[in-house]
Image (cartoon, rainbow, N blue to C red):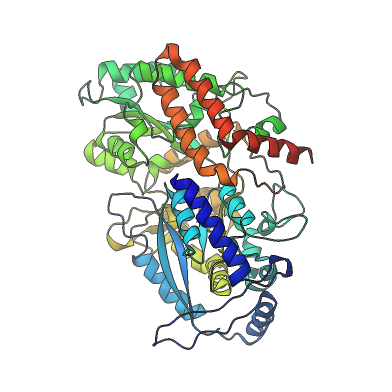
Amino acid sequence: MKRKWLSLILICVMIVSIFGGCKSKTNDTLSVKDESTESSTPESTPTTTAEDSATTEDNNAATDEKPEYSEITVEIFDRGTDGGKTDPTNNYYTDWIKKKALEDLNIGVNFVAVSRWEEIDQLNNLMAAGTAPDVCMTYSGDLIANYRDLGGLANIASYIDTLLVDLKEFLGPDLALPGRDMIMRNANMETGEVFSLPARRMNLAALNTFIRKDWLDKLGLPVPTTTQEFYDALVAFKTQDPGGVGKDKVVPFTMTSDVRWRAATLLESFVDPNLSRKDRWVNTVIDRNFLLPGYKEGVRYLNKMYNDGLVDNQFALYNDDTDSDNLIKSGVVGAFIHNWDQAYRDTPGLLRDLKANVPDAEIISIDPFKNSSGKTEKMLYDAAGLNYFIPASSKNIEGALRYINWLSKFENRYYLQIGDEGVTHELVDGVPKMIAATGEKIMNSPQNLDYTMMINGLDVGDPNKMSQALAQSYAVDPQLIIDAYNNAIRDGRPAIVVPVQLSAAGPYTQTLTDKGKTLMAESVTCKPEEFDAVWDSGIKDWLDSGAQAIIDERAEKFTE
C-alpha cells in the first residue's frame, strides 16, 4: 500500500510540475531560477529558458565571467560503511568541493545523503515530495525511465554543447554504439531528448569469488578450480574449523538478501552458454536473470549448500553489507562473492580489518565456476555505468549542469580520486599508489567514486599507465589486484546494449526488486523436496507482478 500511495503521489506531483511549474516539454524550455534567500548572498538570478541559457553560456564563455551566486543540492550515497568512515555529506572532501566550486563557479553546494542500499525507495520519496536534489544519481535505468515517462526529469539536450563541453569530451565515443558519443547514450533516438547522463567506467570488471587461502593452506587443500572443489572446501571449513573459531561459529559462505548479486558467479555458471543475444536481453528483467535457462538449477545448487549448512543462515535478514562484512572481518567466514575488488577496497576494508584480527589471514580471488562449455563465463560491465539526472522540479538546472561539467574536468576529478600525496596515495614512477588513509581524509568509497559521478575507476590521464595505476590503486599487494582483475575478466561476457527507449519496467521496479529478494530467500532456504514448488510459484508471481509486461516490451523493442 505504501508503494501504491507513493506512486500516486509521485504522479500528482509531477503533473503539477509539468503543467504548473514548467513549460511543455515539446517546446524544450524548462524554467531555471535561483531561489537562494540568504541575506548574505547576491540577489537571485532571473528566470531563464533553455534557449536563453545557451546564449548566456556563450557570453560567459567569451568573457570568462562567473554567473551570479546560486546554490544547488547534490545526492551522495551513504554506503553505511564502518571502519572510520566520515559523514558523506560533511567531511574533508565535501568541504573541498564546496570551497572550490564556490571559487570557480560561484555556486554553493549542499549534499543530500541517500542510502546506497535503499536508493529506489528514498529517491521515490524525494521525487514524490518535489524535494529531490538538483543532481541525482542511480544505478537503476528502469527507475530513470519511470521518472522520464512521468515527466519528472529535465530535458537537458539543449545544454550539452554549451554547459557540458568538458563532460562530453571526457565521456568520448560510445564503444557499444559506434557513431555516437557516450554523452548521448540515453538520448531518445526519435526526438533527441536527453533526460539522464551516463558515467564512464574505466574498468569493466564486475564480479569475483573470494576465499580464505590461509584456511586452504592449513587444511592442505588446493585453490578451487571447479564448482565441486569449491563445495568440498566449504565442507572442510565447516567440519575442520581451520581458523579455530569454533565449529558452531564457522560461516563457510556468506551473502546478503541480494542473492542474485552476492552469489552471481556461482548462479550464472548454470545458465545456458548458447543462449542467443536476443533471448538473454529480452528475458533479463531489472538486471535479474531468474528467467534464463539454467538459472533455476543454480539456485537449486545454492539450496543444497544451504541445507548442508554451508551458507550463512542469517543472510535473508541482511539488507545491506554491514553484517556480512563484520563476519568477514571477525575471521569466521571462509568465502564470499562480491564486486571484483571488494576484498581489497579501503572501504569497507575487509582484508585490512580481518588482518587486524587475524594477522596471518589471506583472502584471494578464485575463478572456479565453469559452465557447460567449460568456461568461467561472467558478466562484464557496460562502459556506461551510473546514471545521473536533473529533476524537473529543480530550481537551478543551469547551476546543476555547470557543477557536473566542473567535476568532469581532469584536475577536479583527479584530486578527488587520489587525494593528497603521503596521505591517501604515494607516487611510484609517477603513478599514484593508494594507501589507507585514517582520520578526516578517509574516503567513504573507492577513489571517492560517489563524489565523481561521471567516472568509475581511476583515470591517471595516460592510457599507457592505466594497468600500473590499477594495480597500485589499493593498499594491498599489487599482485592481488592483478589476479583479481584477470579472474574477473576471464571469459567475460560483454554487456548487451540495445538503443531503444524502454518504459514498462519503471512502475514495477521496486515491487519486482522486493519480490525477487523474497523469491531467492525462500528458494534457497526451503527444504530440497519443496524447491520446485517454491521456485515455480515465486516465478509465476514475479511474472504476474510486472515482469511479463517488461519481457513483452523488450521483445517488441528488440524486433524493432
Q: Is residue 281 above or below residue 162?
A: above
Left or right of 437? Residue 553 is: right
Q: Is residue 470 visible?
A: yes
Q: Residue 271: name its quadrant.
A: top right
- How many numbered marks are there? 0
Residue 494 coordinates in the image, percent (x, y): 64, 38
Q: Is residue 226 visible?
A: no
Most extreme residue toward the top is 529
Left or right of 162? Residue 507 is: left
Q: Residue at x 32, y 23 (%)?
A: 217
Q: Is residue 46 above or below residue 169?
A: below
Q: Residue 337: name its quadrant.
A: top left
Residue 329 coordinates in the image, percent (x, y): 28, 38
- Choose between 4 and 109: the one closer to the eye: 4
Residue 325 coordinates in the image, percent (x, y): 32, 39
- Choose between 360 and 39: the one closer to the eye: 39
Q: Residue at x 60, y 43 (%)?
A: 505
Residue 140 coordinates in the image, percent (x, y): 55, 48
Q: Is residue 242 above or below residue 362?
A: above
**The N terminus is located in which quarter?**
top left
**The C terminus is located in which quarter?**
top right
Q: Residue at x 55, y 78 (%)?
A: 33
